[in-house]
Image (tube, rainbow, N blue to C red):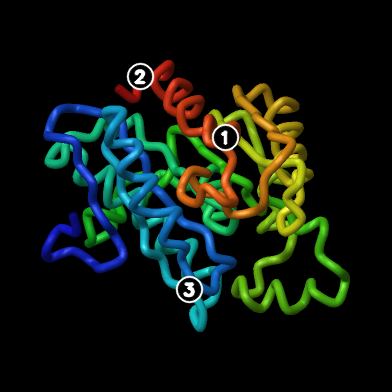
Amino acid sequence: MVEDGFRPWLDIYLVDKAPRGAVVILPGGGYTHRALHEGEPVARTFNERGMHAFVVQYRVAPHPPSAAFLDAARGVRLVRSRAAEWGVKPDHIATCGFSAGGHLAGLLGVHFDAGDSSASDPVERVSNRPDALVLCYAWLSARYLKPEEDVLFSEKWGQRTPNWVSVERHVSPETPPAFLWHTFEDTRVIVEHSLLMAGALYENEVPFELHVYEKGRHGLGLAKDDPAKDDPHVATWADLCVQWLEGMGWV
C-alpha cells in the first residue's frame, strides 16, 4: 500500500504491527528510471518471510544522482523515525538495492550520519545508517570509468569526486554487514564491482556473504518473473538473503 499523507516516493508494505526487521528497497534503473520489477515484487517477497518492506521511489533524471542519494537517506530516516508506529525494529533496518539502487544502498553504508539533533524536522534527527546491506548486481566503483567520463560524473553528483562515489574506497569497520550477489555473465555491471566490495569488507573485518552465479543477465530482480530469460538457480538468492537476515534477528 501507499500510505496517504506521505511523500509519493515511499511505498509501505507492512506485515502487521508486530516488531519486525525492515528492508528499505531501492530499485535500479541507471538513475534514469526505477525498474518496477525490483520494487513491489521484492517488497512482497520479504513480507512473505515476515519482514516489513518499504520501496523508495527516489528521484531520477532529469534530477541528478545526488538527489537520489538524499531521497534514499531520507527513506531510511523516515522508517527509523516511525519505527514504533509501524512496528519496525529501529536497529534492524536493511537497505536492499539493485544495480544503481545497489549503489545508493552501498553509499548509505559508508556515507551515513547520526542525524541532526537540532533539526526542526524530527525525521532529520535520526540516523540514516542501515543496519545491513543487500547489494544486488550493484554498481559500486568508479574505477572503471573512462578518463573522459570523470568530469561528467562529478557534475552529476554535485561536484563530488569519483572517489566519493566509489563505495569500496570508504568501507570501514563501522560499515554494516553485507549480502552481495552478482552473475559472472553480467556485462552491464561487471562482477568486479561486487568482488572489490567484498575485498574491502574483508580487509575491514566487516561480516559479509557473497554469491556469484555463473549464468544470468543484468537486471534479473527476483529472477523468476520471465521464464524465457530467468534462471531458477539464480532465483535462490532471495531465500539465501532472507536466511541471512533471519540469522541476524530480522524476524
Checking the image for residue 175, the label placed there is 1
**For residue 16, side relative to residue 223 (left or right):** left
Is the Cβ of the residue at disc 1 closer than 8 Å to that at disc 3? Answer: no
Q: Residue at x 70, y 73 (%)?
A: 153
The numbered mark, 1 or 3, whose residue comes first in the sequence reads: 3
Disc ID at residue 249: 2
At 73% across and 79% down in the image, what residue appears? 152
Circle 2 — which element? loop
Amino acid type indicated by mark 2: Gly
Q: Which image quarter holds the C terminus?
A: top left
Indicate the amino acid at tag 3: Val
Instruction: Look at 31% across and 65% down and name the residue there.
Output: 9
Quadrant in which residue 109 is drawn: top right
Relative to the observer, which residue lies in front, 22 or 137?
137
Does dot 3 land on a helix, a strand or a loop?
loop
Q: Which mark is residue 60?
A: 3
Q: Left or right: 16 with respect to 30? A: left
How far apart are the alpha carbons under marks 1 and 3? 26 Å
Alpha carbons under labels 2 and 1: distance apart: 18 Å
* Left or right: 140 as drawn, with respect to 68: right
Real-space Cα separation, disc 2 to disc 3, in angstroms: 33 Å
Image quadrant for the N terminus? bottom left
